[in-house]
Image: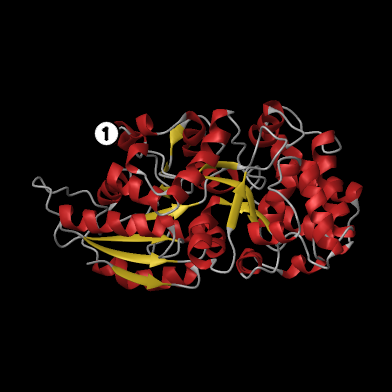
Amino acid sequence: MNTRIRYTGALGAAGALIALTACSSGGDGGGDVPEDGDWSGHTLNVLHYEGADSAMGIAWDKAIEIFEEETGAEVNLETTAFEDLRTSAEQLFDSGDAPDVSEYNKGNATAGQLAAIGVIQNLDDAYEEYGWSDALSDSVATTAQYDENGVMGSGSYYGVPNYGEFVFLYYNKDMFAEAGLEEPTSMADIEAAAATFADQGITPFAESAQEYPLGQLWYQLALSKADRDFVDAYQLYTEPVDWTGEEITYATQTIADWVESGYLDTAITGMTAEDAGLQFINGETPMFYSGSWWYGRFLSDITDFELGTTNWPDTTLTPGSGGNMWVVPVESQEPDLARIFIDVTMRPEVQALLGESGGLPVAANTDDITDPDAQQLIGLFNEVNDRDGLAFYPDWPTPDFYGDLNAVLQGLVNGDYDVASAEAQLEEYYESYAADLR
């Protein structure tokens, strides 16, 4: 039976993994594959940052159960926080304390960087052996492949995304109804609703500028004025990005205007994503623009109002991609078992459970998913996929752009930057990395 351990930080997990690694029988790098498929006596150390009651946590617990039963190996499951692993993975994955398989963030600045410096393993042979590429759409597979510079979309496979994710508008149907408002179907509707709530003394949007939500809202605003050429320039360095062009100026100016109008509270500079999510769960704010990873939790935790969801209106493009990936650290002691485990997470029964639990499976038989809430989420996702709308995330272009973007948007909200200086600072951060890759 697997052991679940909760760590508050990935470096804490690193220290605790010393004992776990010592008790794993794969100290020789996992080279001895049993001919009979019986891995009894082996231990697989799995690390991820999903909650136990999230769609991924539920599905992966099922995968662990199947894996242990079929292989005879034991799983030690460690969980950490997204932010902690993001900042420590390079050190952790290249140490004797590395997990054997880990969830990790996709994109140039994260998985791409680790692939380029050799901290995570090339999985081309496993893709061929298990046929994973057949299960992934082109837009999802984009984030699993990286070239020698760590730029996504070509080269070798370095991870396996087994779920999708995207960002959309959550809204409180009860608050909207009490205000005489319908579901917003245009940008004008969103701003009219925000004005209505602000006039009532209600902050319209739950937000966080300390972490990712505000950056994703800023990017969605830019995408609403953008086309695929802009996305390719921004994400894949195909040509220089115009940081004073319509896309970025509209996004940055709109954030500034919404702060001035009271649609965004200046207190968001010190708020985390969790703080913003709890504001929405508690019915304090009527709108929250964030990702599908919240959906299952909102279904279970929201009890005092009816949850509404809709794609951001007046746009073809939206933030999203294949989900975070399973990667195999270079210092994995059980790489063969890691690949077997990843393959179990891609099985139809695990994928269907992920979908039924509120996630977005990439390899499920959709006929197996009957839950109406799951169908609602998958329907929204299919709308975006049908228009080839997944445009990745704003922090991917450089290894430090997540923190850079958050810091500049915090400055924009609290008045340290005006629109022009915010754009100039973002350009400086971006170009210091991207210029060398064109």
List the residue tagged with mark 1. 129
Residue 403 vs residue 357, the one in the foreground:
357
Q: Is residue 164 above or below residue 229?
A: below
Dot 1 crowding, Cα within 10 Å, few <14, some 14–19, many 20+: few
Where residue 230 appears, x then y in whole percent? 72, 30
Amino acid on which the number 1 mark rests in the picture: Glu
Q: In which quarter of the image is the C terminus?
A: top right
* Horizontal relation, residue 240 to residue 258: left or right: left
x 45%, y 31%: residue: 137
Q: In which quarter of the image is the N terminus?
A: bottom left
Q: Is residue 425 visible?
A: no
SS for callout 1? helix
Residue 421 vs residue 214, the one in the foreground:
214
Where residue 96 appears, x then y in whole percent? 37, 62
Where residue 186 appears, x then y in whole percent? 75, 40
Where residue 200 appears, x then y in whole percent? 83, 65
Q: Is residue 23 above or below residue 187?
A: below
x 55%, y 41%: residue: 380
Residue 207 vs residue 30, the one in the foreground:
207
Residue 278 vs residue 28, the one in the foreground:
278
| Residue 3 occupies quadrant | bottom left
Q: Is residue 45 visible?
A: yes
Taking the view exactly as shown, the residue that stands out farthest to the left is 36
x 51%, y 65%: residue: 81
